Image: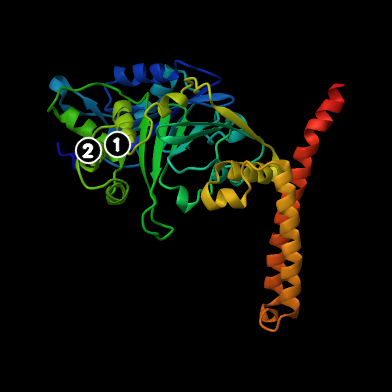
Amino acid sequence: MDDNEFSFINLEFIFTGSKPEAAADVHAVLAEHRLVGFIDGARSREHATEVLAELATLNDARDPVLCQIGPEDALVQGPRLTELAHNLKAASGARFVLINGEELDGPVPGEEQLGQYAPDAQLFQGATLKVSDLTLSPRLEGNTFTVFRNLAGLTVLPSNPLEEPNISRSSRPYLTLTRSGSVLTASIHSKGPLRPQLLPDHVSYQIDLERMRILQASTGSDAQLLLHAMDEWNDGVYADDYEIVDQLLAAGPAREEAKSILRAPRSANNLKRFLTLHGYDPRSIDFLSGAPVPEDAREIHVHGVLNSIRVTFEEFEREATGLMGLLSRTGWSPRALISSSVAVLAAGAIANRAMKTSPSLSRIPKPLRRGLMFFWYSDGVYYLARGVKEALEPKLQKAMSS
């Protein structure tokens, strides 16, 4: 049979409550009927456990004919889906079975019935990545960032995933790793030329660590060829992926190996090698699976918008080097902070008067002048307050302890 004769259908088995053995139960039922396809790892929800199966069919009709593995791993015609679906539901013990998203016997269960999914785990990493890129991300309420450095640069693990982190272009390229149940998604974001918003700016590698074939098939058999075609369809590598790899890696063996990994079957070892080729730490995968972080890791707590602004400013100062380190007074003593702030405020008053009285400077539009002076005075007031605070802290602590 030709691969083009086949189609695929998704069956989602939903069990009530926590059921760690759900994927194994679904596998046993589907294997008993010698069906062709794959089973993904189970996904936990508050009140349910879900298992998705992808089955090969002989057509894409509303009631398709299922494909089975026959003698010598040949592909044979099986029963129609409707003939078998209720048996699969009863044998597996599932409360619901969804066929391409539609419930077999009634309405699709809602979130209020099934509950929310277990939270994702997330990691960011990059040689030029900054903590301040992440602490001002949208929808940041009550988050703790675990931060440490290694040979790959900065690694950050937020306690709650960030939906759309606003990471500056100067901090690219960087890695995002996300784990949803048994699914790992690695996205390496490029610093390449600006692209239209509809085009991706990253290359992704996704793998379900618990995905398995319903039945194995001998090499070269019709069943094995169809399973391989289903794998390729699921992996979905596009021309854009190769283009972004070209931006991330210089021409040479590493670039070619990275492209060959994208073409190869998905595996955890291939993912680790893919990360290594791009300069990232392959152990990052283990950190998302509960492996202990380095002892020198520190935690940053963020609560609310105002607190996130303060934390971001503190992290910006910590990370600042060169001219930016000078402007942010990194490592300055309280006396130096106070003296410099007084000088900044005095210079601001002189500059403001000059812009009002000088014929040439008075041409500056009033809104622009006000904005400039706002930031000028804000800088002086902030570092003056910080200098006073740091100068008084030892005295206050001494007074409280006595």
- Res 115 seen here: no
Against 67, residue 18 (above or below) is above
Task: Using the numbered discs, state the Cα–Cα distance from disc 1 to disc 2 in whole angstroms.
Answer: 8 Å
- Mark 1 neighbour density, 10 Å: few (under 14) some (14–19) many (20 or more): some
* Badge 2 amino acid: Glu
The residue that appears at 43% across and 26% down in the rendered structure is 182
Against 4, residue 212 (above or below) is above
Instruction: Quickly name the residue at label 1.
Output: 277
The residue that appears at 26% across and 40% down in the rendered structure is 59
- Res 118 seen here: yes
Left or right of residue 295: residue 262: left
Q: Residue furthest bottom?
A: 359
> Does the CB distance between marks 1 and 2 fall below 8 Å?
yes
Label 1's element? Answer: helix
Q: Is residue 304 or residue 365 the one in the foreground?
A: 365
Sequence-first tag of 1 and 2:
2
- Mark 2 neighbour density, 10 Å: few (under 14) some (14–19) many (20 or more): some
Q: Which mark is residue 257?
A: 2
Q: Position of residue 162 (x, y in %)?
A: 55, 40
Q: Position of residue 44 (x, y in %)?
A: 51, 25
